[in-house]
Image: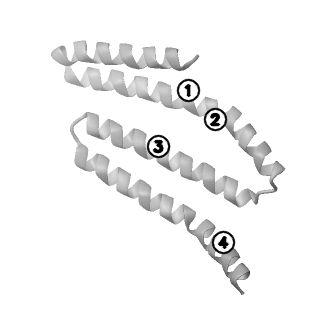
Amino acid sequence: MSIIAVAAVGVIAVFLAVQLKGMKGEYGFYLSAAAGLFILFYGIRKLEGILTVINEIREAIRLNQMYFITLMKLVGITYIGEFASGICRDNGYGFLGNQIEIFGKLSILAVSAPVVLALLNTLEQFMV
């Protein structure tokens, strides 16, 4: 399935959700959430190929695996946070969506802290 198919699933889900919104509003939400989850899980399946390439690059430049794992955690936090906050905003709960984004940013800061410390230690060694 390509981007065209994923886009078609999204657009069809929106059209159907708009039609269902007039009868039962919650059905439109369920339909759009199901389409969003389908696209999310399809995107996760695509990560396998990306992870293989990134792992080959990591091995070629002899990058510490800690950095690779941290990068994947950051991507996951970002993707899940954006997905959840988007669902909240689309359903009129913008405040909750903002709170999810703030928590995601704090999580990114917490996960990336060891990498920043390692960078500072490396810079300190060069400065001495």
What residue is drawn where x is 72% and y is 87%?
128
Location of residue 106 in the rendering, given as x and y in whole percent from the top left corner: 43, 61
Using the numbered discs, state the Cα–Cα distance from disc 2 to disc 1 in whole angstroms: 9 Å
Who is closer to the viewer here, 33 or 43?
43
Whether 61 is drawn above or below 39: the answer is below
Using the numbered discs, state the Cα–Cα distance from disc 1 to disc 4 in whole angstroms: 35 Å
- Residue tagged 2: 47
Q: Give yes or no for contact between labels 2 and 1 (Cβ–Cβ under 8 Å).
A: no
> Mark 3 falls on what kind of element?
helix
Q: What's the residue type where badge 1 is placed?
A: Tyr
Location of residue 85 in the rendering, given as x and y in whole percent from the top left corner: 35, 43
- Residue tagged 1: 42
Who is closer to the viewer here, 1 or 24?
1
- Residue tagged 4: 118
- Write down the quadrant of residue 66 in the picture: bottom right
Using the numbered discs, state the Cα–Cα distance from disc 4 to disc 3 in whole angstroms: 27 Å
Q: What's the residue type where badge 2 is placed?
A: Leu
What residue is drawn where x is 54% and y is 46%?
76
What residue is drawn where x is 39% and y is 57%?
103
- Residue tagged 3: 80
Q: Which mark is residue 128?
A: none
Q: Is residue 19 left or right of residue 10?
A: left
Q: Earlier in the sequence, mark 2 or mark 1?
A: 1
